[in-house]
Amino acid sequence: MKRRDFLLGTFGLGLLAQACKGNHIPVRFESQSPTAHKLRQQQHAAPSKFRSCELLVIGAGIAGLACMRKLSGSTKNIIWIESEQAIGGNSAWKQNSIGKYPLGAHYLPVPDERDAELLQFLTEAGCITAWKDGLPVYNEYHLCQDPEERLFYDGYWQEGLVPSFGIGPEDASEIKRFFEQVNHFKQKKGKDGKDWFCLPIRKCSNDEDARALDNLSFEADLRNRGFSSKALFMYLDYCCKDDYGCRPDQLSAWAGWHYFAARKGRSANASSGDVLTWPEGNGFLVNALLKQCTIQPETGVVALSISAENKSNKVLIWNSKTAEYELITCSQLVLATPQFVNKKLLPAHANAFRNWDYSPWMVANISMKRVPETKGMPLSWDNVWLGKKSLGYVNAGHQLLNPFESKTILSLYFPLCGDNSKEKRKQAHSYSESDWKKWIADELSYAHPGWEDYCSEIAIHLWGHAMPKPRPGFLTDEAFKQQELLAQHGIVLAHSDLSGLSLFEEAFHAGNEAAHHIQQIWNNG
């Protein structure tokens, strides 16, 4: 055989093998139904059914669930609707032959011991099993098991998420100084006696010095403080994408520092850095909230428009189960819906929602027979890499504590960052199955060469509006005063994005406050 033919044959087979690698992996799309989006864009027929109630609650995400939990036992006539077939919003989850997995939110940090309402719910959900010396004792099966976190950096898995190996002394010094600043902000209180940073956001100090941080970007503020380390900025880039879906230069400095300084949870058996997590992610909390609701949501029911008339609200809906338009008349209305939806429901007030911008995300749940490992720390719950398009993945099977079971599901988180979120959404919906598979392969192969040989399935979920982006100036914007205006029409807004922070705590308290407001109206006649 001639040398030329041998080389062509060898390389040809190699290229063919590479091209075919991963082609056997089936891909499923599990994204939210486009029905609601399409319906709100078209002309509607006249309603054929009519209903009335004292309260209509729209939305069964965390805020809607929390609201209905607090209103449970009420004798009032209440209707509760949700456009999706599944509940939970971005805390929704699914299950396959291997196990449960999250479609979005997947953990809850140990809450502040001052948050009585949240701690009461966690006690009822079985997350808190006892109290010791005034501090909660968390269920060991709900606290994230070791090893918790690892970082793939410079070809090696290291413990934790902050680079410690493969960096120079100047980088290490800056990282140390950064966390000293974080600790300073954790203790910082305003002239009003309130914490500069805490949860929920409504309890934070209104000091001018604190709010001034909202006027510039997180990156600008960091550089003003003398930070320039490449390793530090790579880590912070990850953090900003993780919580906000945007880069440090696009993010309010107040929001950037809040990510680090607001967590102050304490317990008898956990620290402020510990988290509660489950195979289905925050789907566990969704189910726990729903169990405490005496009214169940009508799913697959899309709210299309709202009009005020004679001190009541008329809501046109589409019921996908009966394929009919209906009109619901209510005295009070809770919109436990994100502001990009409210903009469509309340066109007369659309200008008030102009500054809400949302980052699109892709979450890929990758079913693995086993995970091929590389050097360093073993497979952990949170497995992160820096400088890539994705953030890394969460091991959905981590909490199952079965050392003999190698099968698991890797939840790969992929924020689609950019200055123009609308264009990023369009791009995401234009990608083919092979496009997504290539993106996923590029990310996983970085730390796990040969992963395709062990993969049995990929389930892709697209979030067009995954979380709000609190850009500079957002938190002090006049749009927040819109809640007071809508209250005059018997409309109460309840959603985490009203705070600019897509966090369970914010959604939970928003729902509780909406329910409290409604109860006050009823009590006052």
Image (cartoon, grey):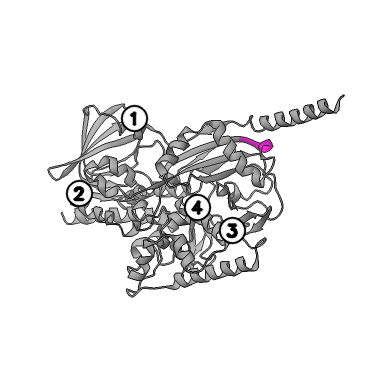
Dot 1 or dot 2, earlier in sequence: 1
Q: CA distance from mark 2 to mark 4?
A: 36 Å
Image height of 159 relative to 414, above or below: below
The answer to whether the residue labelled 3 contacts the one labelled 1, judged by CB atoms less than 8 Å apart, is no
Task: Report the magenta stretch's main SS.
Answer: helix
- Nearer to us: label 2 or label 3: 3
If the image is split into quadrants, where does the C terminus sit? bottom left
Q: CA distance from mark 3 to mark 1?
A: 45 Å
Q: Circle 2 — which element?
A: loop
Q: Which stretch did the figure color magenta?
A: 452-456
The residue labelled by disc 1 is 320
Dot 4 or dot 3, earlier in sequence: 3
Q: Circle 3 — which element?
A: loop
Image height of 454 relative to 155, above or below: above
Residue at (59% x, 46% y) in the render: 397
- Nearer to us: label 2 or label 4: 4
**Residue 503 on image: x %, y %:** 42, 54
Residue 242 tag number:
4
Dot 2 or dot 3, earlier in sequence: 3
